[in-house]
Image: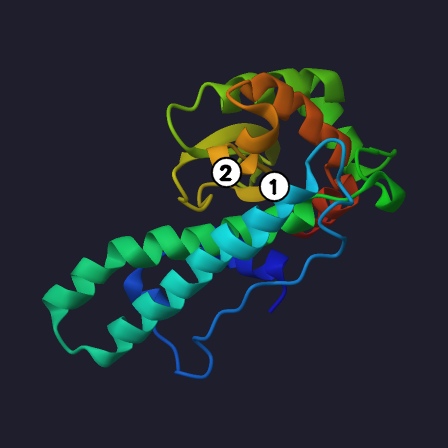
Amino acid sequence: MSILSFARSATRARFSATAAIRSSAASVHTLPKLDYAYDALEPHISGEIMTLHHTKHHQTYVNGLNAAEDAYVKTDSTKDRIKLQAALKFNGGGHINHSLFWKNLAPATQGGGQLHDGPLKAAIERDFGSLGKLKEKMNATTAAIQGSGWGWLGYNQATKKLEVVTTANQDPLLSHVPIVGIDIWEHAFYLQYKNVKPDYLNAIWNVVNFKEAETRLVEASK
């Protein structure tokens, strides 16, 4: 299953322990490979941040999700399964969100930061006025998150519009189809930008993979 298909399925139902049950072989989640080198997004995101973010933080969510799913399948206790739901949501959300995030980014040599004429640009101009206005709104909304979380450009399948929304902690985006996601956890930027979130948020647009975002939008619009 592709990352996009996985994310779309998450928008149709709550991420729950029941949905996490599957065979032992199928329940082994793995860390996805990146489509670019760790230092390919410099100077906007440092290679050190990318290395730690991918190999340490995302790997921790993968390990936690596998452990929680394994424990869920092995127990017949309803009480214990209820207790596991928090771990499934947190680690499952972390895995979903980060798997989307890596695809969300691309170095300039692979089109990062470049929005060309097409369905995505037309939708952005229709719903926000311009790419610049979208950046302003999304940056302000994401920077205002208290604590850790994610800022999203999401597609509302009910209204057929792009909207800026946020999720707390590692909660996956379920109300919209995720088109672009920005990780505002400190591990995503602190080594480079310290506590100056606006600098990180301004910089990341230079490596947003708009081609991938457009693919998500087109599929969500079907």
> Circle 1 is placed at which residue position?
49
N-terminal of the pair, mark 2 or mark 1, is 1
Q: Does the residue at mark 2 contact the one at mark 1 (Cβ under 8 Å)?
A: yes
How far from the left and from the top, in percent, is residue 106?
76, 44
Q: Quadrant of the N terminus?
A: bottom right
Judge the density around disc 1: few (<14), some (14-19), many (≥20) Cα neighbours within 10 Å. some
* Residue displayed at 71% across by 43% down: 105
Q: Secondary structure at mark 2?
A: helix
> Alpha-carbon distance for marks 2 and 1?
7 Å
* Residue 187: mark: 2
Residue 13 seen in render: no
Q: Is residue 142 left or right of residue 72?
A: right
Between 48 and 150, the residue placed more toward the observer is: 48
130 relative to 103, above or below = above
What kind of residue is marked 2?
His
Between 21 and 46, the residue placed more toward the observer is: 46
Between 188 and 119, the residue placed more toward the observer is: 188
